[in-house]
Image (spheres, rainbow, N blue to C red):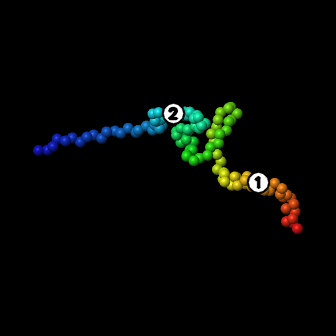
């Protein structure tokens, strides 16, 4: 006796459509200013512009009156603080006189 099992036909697979990432429920692109003047930037905005925790940002008001949030330039703040800390020590320093003394 032979079994009567039929082979299944292979189903045609459709190519899945690429979707943009769906926004999760409860997530919005808005934020409320806290009593301490702090804002929380929504994660989808951070990802879009490539900002991560610890990045420094700069706030600028443009000519149209909008606030722009820019990535702050990577500057060694410690060196700048050190330069400003001892500036008063050289208030009476005469650079021209010092240079003249080198030539002799």
Q: In this view, does 104 lie to the left or right of 32?
A: right
Residue 15's image quarter?
A: top left
Figure quadrant of the N terminus:
top left
Point out the residue furthest to the left here.
1
Figure quadrant of the C terminus:
bottom right
Q: In this view, does 24 lie to the left or right of 92?
A: left
Q: Closer to the camera, 103 or 49? A: 103
Residue 90's image quarter?
A: bottom right
Coordinates of residue 30 in the picture (x, y in percent): 55, 33
Tag 1 residue: 87
Coordinates of residue 35 in the picture (x, y in percent): 59, 34
**Residue drawn at (47%, 38%) of the image:** 21
Q: Which of marks 2 and 1 is nearer the N terminus?
A: 2
Coordinates of residue 13 in the picture (x, y in percent): 35, 39
**Residue drawn at (41%, 38%) of the image:** 16
Give the Cα distance between marks 2 and 1.
Answer: 48 Å
Q: Closer to the camera, 78 or 35? A: 35
Q: Closer to the camera, 60 or 63? A: 60
**Residue drawn at (66%, 54%) of the image:** 78
Tag 2 residue: 28
Q: How dense is the environment of label 2, judged by Cα within 10 Å: few (below 14), some, or many (20 and up)?
A: few
């Amino acid at each position: 006796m032979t079994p009567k099992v039929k082979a299944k036909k292979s189903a045609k697979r459709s190519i899945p459509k690429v979707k943009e990432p769906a926004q999760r429920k409860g997530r919005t692109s808005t934020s409320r200013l806290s009593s301490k003047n702090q804002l929380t930037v929504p994660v989808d905005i951070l990802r879009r512009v490539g900002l991560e925790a610890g990045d420094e940002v700069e706030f600028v008001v443009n000519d149209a009156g909008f606030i722009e949030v820019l990535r702050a330039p990577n500057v060694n703040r410690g060196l700048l603080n050190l330069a400003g800390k001892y500036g008063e020590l050289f208030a009476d320093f005469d650079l021209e006189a010092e240079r003249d003394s080198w030539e002799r």
